[in-house]
Amino acid sequence: MECLTWPLGVSLFLLGLLLRVWAQQHVHYRLKVKKYLTTTGPYALVRNPIYVGNLLICLGLIISSELLWFAPIAFSYCFGIYSLVVRYEEGHLLEKYGEDYRKYLSEVPRWFPNTIRFENLGIKNEYFRATIVAEIHCALALLPYLVKEVIGGIL
């Protein structure tokens, strides 16, 4: 089982990072472009893909660190924070976008996709490069575990 720990952890981490990059391409949060109601890309599947990506990153780091006892603590914290933040964001977006956002709320689930619609997924768009630059800081979270693995292999 221990030989699967590192590959599984890194795979989940990278999956979360890719989900964040994909979502940022569509929402343009850190990019200096006009904002609008985003319903494409991963936002066609779930309303909070960046937070889902963060949870996958967190799970990947926990598995890579081999501190599985920390998982319930980390997820309780994440779910507590995200439930508060999501309620606030949904209220704000409802005020900002009105009926369009209300329709989106009724059509797209908050956390888990119930169907996959392929027409609006837009895996890569013109914001891909800028999004990679804006999200590269997330990759640094894996660095301590990589150093641990390298040093552990040498010693």
Image (tube, grey):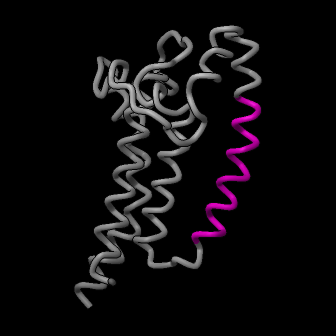
Is 152 in the magenta? no
Q: Name the side, left or right, on which 45 lies relative to 102.
A: left
Q: Is residue 14 above or below residue 118?
A: below
Is 74 in the magenta? yes
As rendered, which of 80 and 99 lies closer to the eye? 99
As rendered, which of 29 and 113 lies closer to the eye? 113
The quarter in which the N terminus is drawn is bottom left
Q: Position of residue 133 (x, y in %)?
A: 35, 34
The magenta segment is 71-89
Q: Name which residue lies at 68% across and 16% down.
A: 102
Q: Is residue 79 above or below residue 61?
A: above
Q: Name the side, left or right, on which 16 lies relative to 71.
A: left
Q: Position of residue 9 (x, y in %)?
A: 37, 66
Q: Main SS of the magenta segment?
A: helix
Q: Name which residue lies at 52% across and 33% down.
A: 46
Q: Quadrant of residue 146?
A: bottom left
Q: Position of residue 145 (x, y in %)?
A: 38, 70
Q: Residue furthest bottom?
A: 155
Total label count? 0
